[in-house]
Amino acid sequence: MTYEHLSQLPEDPSSYWIASTSFSDADPLKENTETDVVVVGAGITGITAAYLLIHEGFDVILLDADNILHGTTGHTTAKITAQHDLFYHDLIQHTSIEKARTYYNVNEEAKKFIETIVREHKLTCGFEEQDAVLYATSSQDYNALQKEKKAYETLGIPHEMRSEVPFNESAQAALAMTGQAQFHPLHYLTFLLEAFKKRGGKVYENTTITGMVEGERPVLETRQGKYLISRFVLSCTHFPFHDANNYYFTKMHAERSYVIAAKAPDVNGMYLSVDTALPKRSIRSVTINGENYLLIGGESHKTGQGKDQLAHYKALQSFAERVFNAKEFPYRWSAQDLYTLDSIPYIGVLTDNESNTFVATGYRKWGMTSGTAAAIMLKNYVLGNETEDMALFDPNRFLINPSLKHFLKHNSDVTMLFFADKLKPAAKKVDDIALGEGGIVSLNGRRAGVYRDKHGDMHAVDTTCKHLGCEVHWNNGDRTWDCPCHGSRYDVDGRVIEGPAKEPLDPLPE
C-alpha cells in the first residue's frame, strides 16, 4: 500500500505522556549504600512498589538505568482494564475456571487501587471511567467474540454485547467490559514518586546495574562501580536485569507496537479490534491542550522483524483519516512489550534458591493493571504475606499448554534468524545512506550499521548484538538498531535502550 496522500507525520517520535509531564531530575548513585529494599526499574511497577513499601516502614531505594518514566510506562496507551484482548476463553481452556477468575480479580483489584489513589488525593490525571470494548468486523471473529462472552458469563465479569461501534467501522458485534478506565499515567505516577520521596525514599537515575550477588543480603554493582547492599531486591526492569539462570530470553519474546495522536471528535469508550485477517486497532480518547484527540495504536510485530517501521505509523494514520477524517497528528511513538510463553506475567520469587529477590515482567501490553497488580504482589512477598492466588504468576511455574509449543517455535525462529542474518550480505554502500537514514552497509570490508544524521555526520556500529550475537536490524521509524532474536535495542551510537543486552554495540571508525 502507498501513503503519498497522507498528511505529514512528526519527523521525530515523541510520546504525549512524556512531552506533557514535568520531571524532577535525579542524580546517578555516587556512593556505596546499604538499605532495606532496592527497587530496580522506575516504571509503574517499580514506583508503585516503592511507594507501597516505604509506607510499610522500609528504607527503599528506587533506581533506573535511564531517565525515570521514559521507558515502556511512558509509551503506553494507558488503558486501566482487566480486558486483555480475547483472553479469558483461552485462559479457561489452558488452565481452569478458578485460575481465570483469579487473573481477572487481580487485575480488577489493581484498577480499584489506581482509582482509590486518584479519588483520595484528588489527582488531576485525566482519570475517566470508560468501558473497554472488543469489536469484530468478520463472522469468524464474531464467533471468537461469542466464546469470550461465554467466558465472561462463566467468570461473572460485568459485560454488555453491542451490535455496533460509534465510528465508521462495520462491526459484526462488540463485547464491552463495563466500568473500566483510562488516565494520564505519568501525572498519576509522578504523584506516587513525589509521595515516595517525601517519606524519605531515595531515587537515582542513569544508574545501570551490571551484576548481582545473591545471598542473605544481595549485593548489586552499578556500571559506575558502586555497590548497593540490601535485604530485598525487586527487579521491575521490563526485561529482568538479573537472569539467575532462568533464561528469560528463551521464555519471552518482545513485540513492538505503534501509537499516533490524531485530532478527531471524542469517542466514548476504549476500543480494540479482534480481527485476525486485519491488523489490530486500539482506540481511546485523550484531551490535549483542551481539545479532543484520539490515540490510535496497533501494527504489532516482533522486535527487529517485519516491514519498514515507518510504514506502521503511516498505516495507523491512513486508518485515522479513513475512519475519523483526522488531519492533524502531533505525536507518534512506539512501545516494546514482553510476552511470556503462556501470556501470564512472571511475578514472584526470581529463583527458588533465594527468597529475597523478586521479578515482575511479561505484561503483554497491559501494564497499567498488570504492573500495579505486580507491585501489590511484590509488596506482599517482601512482607511474607504470600497468598494462593500469587502462584498463578510464579516465574518458575511449570510450562502449561500452549507454552511448550510457543517455547519451541520462538527458539527455533531465533536459531534461523541467527544464521540467516550472519550469511546475508550488506545490501547497501555507505554512499547510499541519505540524511536521517540508516542501514546495513559494507564498511572497510566488513558488515556495519550506519546512520547519517541531519548534519551529514555518520554514526557507525558493529551490528552484532551484545546479548547472544545475533545481527541487529535498522528501525527507520524510531531510528534505532533492534535485535530480532531477543528484542535488545540500541540508539544510533550503539547505547543500550532495551535489554536483555547490557553492553553497547562496538563503535566503528568511518
Image: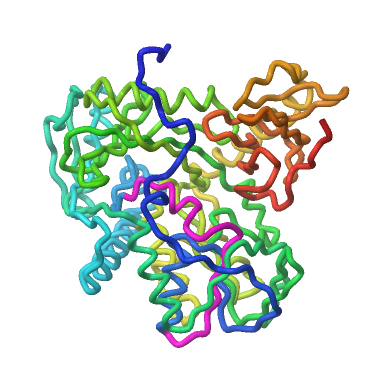
Left or right of 34: which side holds 181?
left
Image x and y of residue 468, in percent: 75, 43
Above or below, comparing residue 161 to residue 445 in the picture = below
Q: Tell me how the rendering is colored.
A: rainbow
Q: Going 63% across and 59% down the picture, which residue do you hit?
A: 241
Q: Residue furthest front?
A: 455
Magenta span: predominant SS is loop
The one nearer the camera, 479 or 397, is: 479
Above or below, comparing residue 46 to residue 383 in the picture = above
Residue 149 appearing in the image:
no
Left or right of 314: which side holds 145?
left
Image x and y of residue 294, in percent: 26, 37
Left or right of 210: which side holds 342?
left
Q: Going 60% across and 66% down the picture, which residue do you hit?
A: 350
Q: How many marks?
A: 0
Left or right of 55: which side holds 382?
right
Quarter of the view holding residue 168: top left
Image x and y of residue 339, in percent: 50, 45
Image x and y of residue 258, in percent: 43, 35
- Give the quadrant of the N terminus: top left
Q: Is residue 278 magenta?
A: no
Residue 240 appearing in the image:
yes
Quarter of the view holding residue 133: top left
Q: Which residues are magenta?
A: 56-78
The one nearer the camera, 60 or 163, is: 60
The one nearer the camera, 226 or 413, is: 226
Q: Is residue 64 magenta?
A: yes
Q: Residue furthest bottom?
A: 57
